Image (cartoon, grey):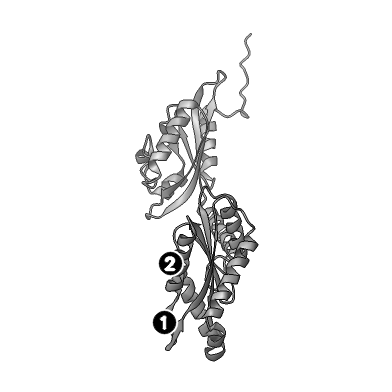
Amino acid sequence: MLLARPACPDLPSVEGAEAGWAELVSTLPQIVWVARPDGYHTYFNQQWLDYTGLTLAESLGDGWNPPFHPDDRPLSRRLWAEATRTGQPYEIEYRLRRHDGVYRWMLGRAVPMRDDTGAIVKWFGTCTDIEDLKAALEEAATLREELERRATHDPLTGLANRDLLFEQMDLMLHRRQGAGLAVVFIDLDWFKAINDRLGHRIGDQLLVVVADRLRAAVRPGDVAARIGGDEFVVVGAADDQDEAERLARRITEAVGGSVRLEGVPISVTASVGVTFVEAGEAPSADLVLAQADARMYEAKRRR
């Protein structure tokens, strides 16, 4: 007598398992999708449809790419094609258009599901919204850059400060390739009198004006710094003493001239000293700056 095999109600059918999986992914906050081994997309969960505003029919196949930002579409296609060709996991950051036209940053990932022989039978992928995370990281990076800038730049004028000047001078003195170096020391004339007569607010405004004039006068690769009070330094390449002197004259002419601050006319002049370091010489930055400083004071005494 043959006995019938008892039913196993605890083992779900294939259809039941598929339905349970679909129900599970519908509760996830992430977008979930499935693709064939060749990369053809066959499934998107409801989060994709709600986010993009597309229908399932519009999304299948290659319909996933149009909602990507135009600048991100070529890279996403290339990386997805490479993943399906090599079987390596897929990962990309891209901007995905929401149903209202707003783009948000997403992290896209996909991994292959393989059979017993190692052949890929499906790809399972997710899209995770990382817009807020990227914004937080960018804000943190901006704060870090601001802190670094404060450590290396004069807070009033935005020019390099003394620490950055010496760092750059050391590099320029020891890493030159067949070029000399000019160091120009600038000290404003009668600045203390201007501060005493018109106040520190006007004095600070004058320092900012001078800094702007220096920025406009220096060449690409030159370093302009404020090292304290009304003292500024410009360091740049020079082939010989004559070129160093020409740089000093250009700086003097650029800094000088009249300016009106809060209705008060001010005549700006500066005393300048220059030191030229020949190619092949590598004195200390302190020594070179001290020489330029001494020549500036000599020029001030003559004036």
Residue 197 locus on image (x, y percent): 54, 91
- Residue at coordinates 53% horizontally, 41% vertically from top-left? 25
In primary-sequence order, the first of circles 2 and 1 is 2
Indicate the secondary structure of the residue bearing disc 2. helix
For residue 217, which numbered disc appears in the image? 2
- Residue at coordinates 49% horizontally, 28% vertically from top-left? 122
- Is residue 243 depicted above or below 113 in this figure? below
Q: Which of 104 and 70 is in front in this view?
A: 70
Indicate the secondary structure of the residue bearing disc 1. strand
Residue at the far top in the pictured view:
1
Badge 2 crowding class, 10 Å Cα cut-off, few under 14, some 14 to 19, many 20 or more, is: some
Residue 86 in view, yes or no: yes
- Is residue 111 depicted above or below 236 in this figure? above
- Residue at coordinates 58% horizontally, 75% vertically from top-left? 297
- Residue at coordinates 49% horizontally, 75% vertically from top-left? 208
Residue 135 in view, yes or no: no
Residue type at mark 1: give it: Ser
- Is residue 290 depicted above or below 82 in this figure? below
Q: Nearer the viewer, residue 110 or 202?
A: 202
Residue 123 locus on image (x, y percent): 49, 31
Residue type at mark 2: give it: Ala
Q: Quadrant of residue 81?
A: top left
Total marks shown come to 2
Please give the residue where the numbered disc 1 appears in the rendered image: 258
Q: Nearer the viewer, residue 3 or 133?
A: 133
Residue 299 locus on image (x, y percent): 54, 75
Residue 223 locus on image (x, y percent): 52, 61
- Is residue 232 depicted above or below 44 in this figure? below
Q: Quadrant of residue 160?
A: bottom right
Q: In which quarter of the image is the N terminus?
A: top right
